[in-house]
Each structure stands twice: as structure tokens, then as C-alpha cells.
Image (cartoon, rainbow, N blue to C red):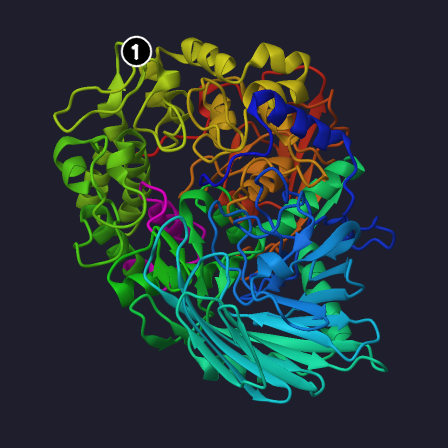
């Protein structure tokens, strides 16, 4: 999650009203009803396109390099409240908090080309003339032009239907993107082909530059063409180069008889040759053929999860969330296997596909685990790609975009990401390689001449047991600083130490395992016994900032109230610090406003928990819109009251609706969507970076998961909860393949060995899962 602009409107009341209204209103643009049983018909790509969900409605295939989508003026691309489209650009990330991507916005126009600023030549549109489904997007512009988009892995395909005119234009804007543009070049190669190179930087701050190469091939020759630079349009010009100023090309067709123009744009992060190879391999097909193939790709992906029961709205939000969970990370290698590494050199992926775009502070908590379950082969390649970053640049990533590190967010998120891959069996043959990279990351700090910050406060953490909070400390490198968020960085480091210690022990590195396990207890170093909460410490070790945990400082995008549950490695220890199970349950009940929740779950979620998409601070309540306390509802599994986990989770699920406002916070490359999917199924990763999955009541009567037999030999897992409903939501008993099951968690090995997990539910809490032995174990 990352702060961008403020929510339209003012204050808590507006935010709550918008969310409440979103739960009831029917959006002007959404997916068509599922008339023929296709799961793709249940997906509404417009969910999250308003109130800073920052999703995009355009065309992509699972994990594709290209995300072909309209940009309306919002800094991350599309906002459902806007009324003009500036262009259809090729690169977007679902739910990011700062502008990046938006490369090569293309827009069809008619008449003379006079304006070169896409904010001025933007086309007006109405949601009444807009449709989207997985793999395709269509909009009717007020200019009388219909625009349609679809995609392959590395190309975007566009089809424009113009009025009858001899001045039907396609504008290719190389000089304006969602990120900062440093230099661009456009070349009209022949009467059907335009090539560009776009060098940019950014994502919340300046980063090292990276270059995206594109080539666009039209299905028929254009009549005339030209370029522009700045405000100057030059008819007949074939090339144009520019620095930061506007730069682009236009091509013109006569549509007096044939009104349709199709084109395919291929990308490469390597070079112009790579873009041409990608075009040759994936281009050359009609729009209709590509759109059908994209729809099939999504149907095949969604079909691995078959949910029965639940309302139409619940099913739509579920499958829309499942769809968004497969949008990233993204393919970074060309069809010949070449990719640009973080050393800015060209490499070739052998035996795997190289992926990029790593929102690790977000995805390590939910999406990484969902992909390891439903897309393990791709997850393996993703983990290997992260190891390549270490091999080629010297350090593991924190928040990587394209070919560069951004250093956005804090802590050590790459460790639980990779230990999760290890625990799920995705790193076979690479275990020691991964361990060496993780050990270096956990025990050191990147040098000043390298881009990553890594564990920036590691020197102090290793010597004193905590990362200090040093307010106003100058940043040594672009991005966020662990020193600005010392308290939460300490908790994140300790969590990662626990996960790495477990991996070290299993690989036989016993001394390291003991050392990391000891460091995993460092969360205790910032516990203030006088307040009963975590607090930041300054460089001298003194507690600093307000004593009130709702107004605490030194916690990244949260408060001490929210971060107190981020000790998944040792919840029994945390419970003891608070004062035992009764005291912990009382604090949890206060945190979730539990008594209010029982009376009206949806109202509590919208009016007590949620205060706006970027209200991270000054709160003593659960924030389901942000990452730090995503695991918090599952804490009750460790305090002997597992039924309350279901109560809280089901209340939080009401925030996901089938509307443009139906995303709870930024989606953060599928993080929030994956939370919805896993929590709806009732199997959730309560200890990220391990193989432990907590259990709660599913919202569906039956979910059949088709699993990859290479990683899950039985090939499927069925989760049943006959009769589950808003009232009958409490687990009375559970059975695994017919045998009684009393634990509130599964391990990955359990999932591999189990074909059916079934729950008996009722309208009142039971004693199921309430024993100490039923709780997820602490890591040792």
C-alpha cells in the first residue's frame, strides 16, 4: 500500500458513505451475467477502479508482460469517476499506490492532428458504452470511434472502428506516461510499422532509469503519417527523438470504405530486436482470434477453483478477486528467453520464465501463498527470478519494478517470500542457493554504491536487537527508509528471522538456525511494559513517540494497535506479554469492535474499521484496507476462540462488492484480492513464510481446487461446508478424508495428503478448535 492522492470528497463520513453506497449500487459498467456457465462471465474488471483501489479494467492474460488498458488522468491509470480517456497504454500494475507504467498511450482520433498533450486531446466517453471481461476491453468514444483491446503474453492488440472519413488517425504518444519520462525515440519504419524506445524512471520517487521498447504493426498500410515533438507537429516526418518533452507519431487511414483498423503492439525490456521477435512470435492474428484465446486462457485459470453456493454477488467478488490474483508478477523475458537483469545487462533464462514486478511487502502475506497453491509452476519461476536478481545485482529485492529497485516500503519482505517458496517445495535443487542469498540479506547491509537498501537498519538491529526510529534522518538512497519506521521494521526483521531460522534448521545449518530463532524474539525488545504495547526506540534505546498506542510513531502505515499482532512466529509469546489469553481476547475484541460487529457486521466494517483508503494512523481499530494487520483476524485461532476469526473474516468480506468501489484499499498486485479468495475458501496463510494454513468457515458450501500433480500428488482438494450462511457460520466439527480433525490449521503436507476437508456448521459457537493443542504452533 502506498499513499497517492486523497479520496474524492472529504472526511470519514464521505468515505463510509461511498463504501456503503458501493455495496448497494449497480455500476454503470460491469461484466455481463454468467449466462452460459463460463467463470469469466462472473469477473468484473471494474471492481476497484474507484476510491483508490487503483485496479485497471483493460486487457491482459495471466501474468502477461502487457496490460492494455485506458488511462483517464488518475496517477495510476484509470479512475471510474473520470469521463475522458487520454490513451490506451500497454503497461499497468493492479492496485499500486504510485504512478508507474502507462507506456505508449495510443488513441484513435479523427481530423487534423493539432494537439500533442494527451490531457488536451483526450476523448470523452460514457460507461454506458464501456465493457470489460478477462482478456478484453471495449469502449465507444463520443467522437464516434469504437475502441477494442485484447492481449497475448507480450503483445497488445487493438481494433478501432472509425466513422467514414479520410482523416482517421492513431496517435502513438511516446513522451507521456504515468511515470517520469527521461528520453524517447519514435521511428516510422514503413507504411505499416512504428517503433519506439521509452526510457523512464519513477514509482513514488526517482529510480534508476529503465527502457521499454515497442513495435506496432498495423493490419493495412496507413495513407500518411508524421511525428511531433513538444507542440510542433511535422507531417511526413519519419523519426523524432526527445528528452523529457512530449514526443510521438501519428498515422492516418482512409476509412471511407473500410472503417476498421487493427494493430498489434509488442513490448520488450531488452531491445528493439526483442520487441520484433515478440511481435513475430505472438502477432499476426486477428483481433477476434486473440480475444478468444485470451478468454480461454482466463477460463482455464479460473476453472481450477470451482465454488458452489453463495450469492451471485459473493461469487462475482470471489472470481473477480481470483482474476486479479493472477495479474502479477509479470513476464519479463522475451520469447527467446532474454531479459534485462538488475545489473542492466542482457541475460537469458534457461529452463524457466523470468518474471518481474515485486510488491513484496504486500504480496508475501497472501498472494505468494495463493499462487504457490494454484500456480506452483509459475511460482517456482518467480522464485528463481528473484534469485537471479541477487545473482546479477548482488542483493535480493525489496520492491522491484521492471529492471530496477525502487526501495518502496520497509522491513525484509523478500525473506518470507522465498522461505514460502522453499516450504511449498518450489525451490528443489536451489535450496542452498536461496539460503545463501537470504543469509547474506539477513546478516548484512547493501553497500552505499548499490541501489538496494535491504535491511537498512541491520547494523543496529544486530547489535541492539531493534531498528531505531530516527525521525528526520536523511535518506541515503531513494525510496523508504527503515529508520523512519524503526518499530515496524523491527517486527518485520524478527518475523523474517523466524522464517529463515526454520529453513536453516531444515537444511542442517544448526548454528544459524539457533541464531535466527533467537533473533526472532527481538519483537520483545520494543515491547513497553508500561503501556502493554510495542513502541519505537530511538538510537539511544529510549522509547520515543506518544505513549498512546493509537497515536504511536515509527510504524509504517499503521499504529501499535495494528502491528501488535504481527508476531506470527510466536503468538503464544505475544499473548503472554499482553497478560494471557483472557487479556488478549479482550484486547482483540476491542480492536475489532466485536460487540458492534455481532450486531451489524457490514456497518461495523464500513463505519468503524474503515476511515478512508489512506488513513493509516491514529487508529485503535482493525484496518482491513492495508497489509500490516491482514493476519490479525486469525489471531483468535491462538487464543482459544476460533469462532471469532470467522465472525471478523466474514465481516471484512462484506467490504468486497461487485462495484467500482468494491475493493478494500489498494489491491497491491493482488494482495487484497488474494486475501478475499483465501478467506472465502477458509484456508489462510497465518504464518507467512512457512507451510501453515489457518482455518475458518468458508463462505461457499463447496470449493473444488484442481492442483498441479507435480507439486500436489492427489491433484485436488475439496473444501465443504454444507449449509454455511450468514447465520450458520460457526464450525461445529471438521473432518479430513472422513477422520475427525480438531486442529485450526493445516500444513502444506496435509494439503498434499488430503482430498476432502469438510466442516459441519451451526448457528452458535462450539468448542471445536478451542484447545491449546489445536492452535497453530509457534516456530522454534
Residue 336 percent across, percent down from the top left: 47, 81
- The answer to if 755 sits in the magenta stretch is no
Quadrant showing the C terminus: top left
Q: Is residue 439 left or right of residue 689?
A: left
Q: Residue 761 sits in which quadrant? A: top right
Residue 553 percent across, percent down from the top left: 31, 24
SS for callout 1 = loop
**Does residue 529 appear anywhere in the picture?**
yes
Residue farthest bottom in this picture: 190
In-front residue for pair 634/566: 566
Magenta residue span: 407-432
**Does residue 768 appear anywhere in the picture?**
no
Which residue is labeled 1 in the image? 531
Residue 181 percent across, percent down from the top left: 43, 63
Q: Residue 513 sits in which quadrant? A: top left
Q: Tag 1: Cα neighbours inside 10 Å, few (<14), some, or many (≥20)?
A: few
In-front residue for pair 459/246: 246
Residue at point 28% right, 38% down? 493
Residue at point 20% right, 53% down? 446
Vertical comparison of 662 with 610: above or below: below
In-front residue for pair 350/275: 275
Residue 119 percent across, percent down from the top left: 59, 56
Number of callouts:
1
Q: Is residue 239 left or right of residue 502?
A: right
Residue at point 69% right, 85% down? 222
Amino acid at each position: 500500500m502506498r499513499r497517492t492522492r486523497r479520496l474524492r470528497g472529504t472526511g470519514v463520513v464521505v468515505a463510509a458513505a461511498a463504501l456503503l453506497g458501493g455495496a448497494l449500487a449497480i455500476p454503470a459498467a460491469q461484466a455481463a451475467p454468467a449466462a452460459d456457465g463460463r467463470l469469466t462471465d462472473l469477473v468484473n474488471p471494474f471492481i476497484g477502479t474507484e476510491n483508490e483501489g487503483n485496479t485497471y479494467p483493460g486487457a491482459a492474460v495471466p501474468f502477461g508482460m502487457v496490460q492494455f488498458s485506458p488511462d483517464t488522468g488518475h496517477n495510476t491509470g484509470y479512475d471510474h469517476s473520470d469521463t475522458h480517456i487520454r490513451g490506451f497504454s500497454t503497461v499497468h500494475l493492479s492496485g499500486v499506490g504510485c504512478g508507474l507504467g502507462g507506456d505508449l498511450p495510443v488513441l484513435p482520433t479523427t481530423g487534423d492532428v493539432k494537439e500533442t498533450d494527451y490531457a488536451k486531446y483526450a476523448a470523452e466517453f460514457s460507461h454506458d458504452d464501456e465493457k470489460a471481461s478477462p482478456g478484453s476491453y471495449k469502449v465507444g468514444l463520443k467522437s464516434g470511434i469504437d475502441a477494442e483491446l485484447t492481449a497475448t503474453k507480450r503483445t497488445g492488440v487493438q481494433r478501432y472502428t472509425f466513422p467514414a472519413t479520410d482523416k482517421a488517425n492513431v496517435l502513438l504518444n511516446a513522451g507521456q506516461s504515468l511515470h517520469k519520462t527521461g528520453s524517447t525515440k519514435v521511428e516510422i519504419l514503413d507504411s505499416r510499422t512504428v517503433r519506439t524506445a521509452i526510457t523512464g524512471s519513477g514509482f513514488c520517487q526517482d529510480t534508476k532509469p529503465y527502457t521499454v521498447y515497442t513495435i506496432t504493426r498495423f493490419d493495412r498500410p496507413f495513407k500518411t503519417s508524421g511525428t511531433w515533438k513538444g507542440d510542433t507537429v511535422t507531417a511526413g516526418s519519419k523519426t523524432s527523438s526527445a528528452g523529457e518533452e512530449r514526443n510521438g507519431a501519428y498515422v492516418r487511414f482512409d476509412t471511407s470504405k473500410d472503417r476498421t483498423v487493427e494493430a498489434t503492439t509488442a513490448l520488450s525490456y531488452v531491445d528493439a530486436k526483442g520487441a520484433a521477435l515478440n511481435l513475430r512470435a505472438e502477432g499476426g492474428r486477428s483481433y477476434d482470434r486473440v480475444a478468444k484465446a485470451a478468454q480461454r486462457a482466463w477460463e482455464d485459470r479460473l476453472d481450477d477453483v470451482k465454488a458452489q453456493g453463495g450469492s451471485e454477488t459473493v461469487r462475482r467478488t470471489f472470481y473477480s478477486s481470483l482474476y486479479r490474483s493472477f495479474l502479477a508478477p509479470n513476464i519479463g523475458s522475451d520469447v527467446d528467453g532474454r531479459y534485462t537483469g538488475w545489473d542492466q545487462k542482457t541475460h537469458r533464462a534457461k529452463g524457466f520464465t523470468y518474471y518481474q514486478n515485486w510488491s513484496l511487502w504486500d504480496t508475501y502475506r497472501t498472494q505468494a501463498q495463493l499462487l504457490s497453491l494454484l500456480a506452483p509452476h509459475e511460482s517456482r519461476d518467480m522464485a528463481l527470478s528473484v534469485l537471479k536478481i541477487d545473482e546479477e545485482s548482488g542483493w535480493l529485492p525489496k520492491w522491484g519494478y521492471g529492471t530496477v529497485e525502487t526501495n518502496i516500503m520497509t522491513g525484509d519482505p523478500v525473506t518470507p517470500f522465498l522461505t514460502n517458496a522453499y516450504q511449498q517445495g518450489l525451490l528443489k535443487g536451489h535450496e542452498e542457493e536461496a539460503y545463501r542469498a537470504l543469509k547474506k540479506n539477513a546478516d548484512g547491509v547493501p553497500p552505499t554504491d548499490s541501489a538496494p537498501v535491504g535491511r537498512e537498519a541491520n547494523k543496529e538491529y544486530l547489535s541492539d536487537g531493534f531498528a531505531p526510529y530516527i525521525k528526520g534522518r536523511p535518506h541515503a538512497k531513494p525510496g523508504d527508509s527503515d529508520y523512519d519506521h524503526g518499530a515496524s521494521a523491527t517486527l518485520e526483521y524478527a518475523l523474517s528471522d523466524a522464517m529463515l531460522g526454520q529453513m536453516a534448521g531444515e537444511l542442517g545449518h544448526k548454528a544459524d538456525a539457533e541464531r535466527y530463532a533467537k533473533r526472532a524474539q527481538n519483537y520483545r525488545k520494543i515491547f513497553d511494559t508500561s503501556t502493554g504495547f510495542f513502541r519505537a526506540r530511538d538510537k539511544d534505546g529510549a522509547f520515543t513517540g506518544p505513549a498512546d498506542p493509537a497515536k504511536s510513531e515509527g510504524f509504517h502505515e499503521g499504529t501499535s494497535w495494528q502491528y501488535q499482532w504481527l508476531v506470527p512466529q510466536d503468538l503464544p509469546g505475544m499473548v503472554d506479554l499482553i497478560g494471557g489469553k483472557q487479556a488478549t481476547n479482550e484486547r482483540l475484541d476491542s480492536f475489532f469492535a466485536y460487540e458492534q460487529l455481532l450486531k451489524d457486521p457490514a456497518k461495523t466494517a464500513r463505519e468503524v474499521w474503515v476511515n478512508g483508503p489512506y488513513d493509516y494512523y491514529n487508529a485503535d481499530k482493525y484496518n482491513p484496507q492495508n497489509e500490516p494487520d491482514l493476519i490479525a483476524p486469525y489471531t483468535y485461532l491462538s487464543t482459544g476462540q476460533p469462532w471469532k476469526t470467522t465472525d471478523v473474516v466474514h465481516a471484512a468480506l462484506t467490504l468486497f462488492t461487485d462495484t467500482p468501489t468494491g475493493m478494500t484499499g489498494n489491491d497491491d498486485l493482488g494482495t487484497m484480492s488474494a486475501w478475499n479468495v483465501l478467506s472465502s475458501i477458509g484456508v489462510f496463510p497465518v504464518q507467512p513464510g512457512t507451510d501453515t494454513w489457518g482455518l475458518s468457515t468458508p463462505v461457499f458450501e463447496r470449493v473444488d481446487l484442481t492442483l498441479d500433480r507435480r507439486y500436489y500428488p492427489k491433484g485436488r482438494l475439496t473444501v465443504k461446508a454444507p449449509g454455511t450462511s450468514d447465520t450458520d457460520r460457526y464450525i461445529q466439527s471438521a473432518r479430513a478424508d472422513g477422520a475427525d480433525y480438531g486442529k485450526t490449521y493445516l500444513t502444506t503436507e496435509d494439503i498434499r495428503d488430503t482430498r476432502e476437508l469438510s466442516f459441519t456448521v451451526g448457528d452458535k459457537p462450539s468448542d471445536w478448535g478451542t484447545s491449546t493443542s489445536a492452535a497453530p504452533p509457534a516456530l522454534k
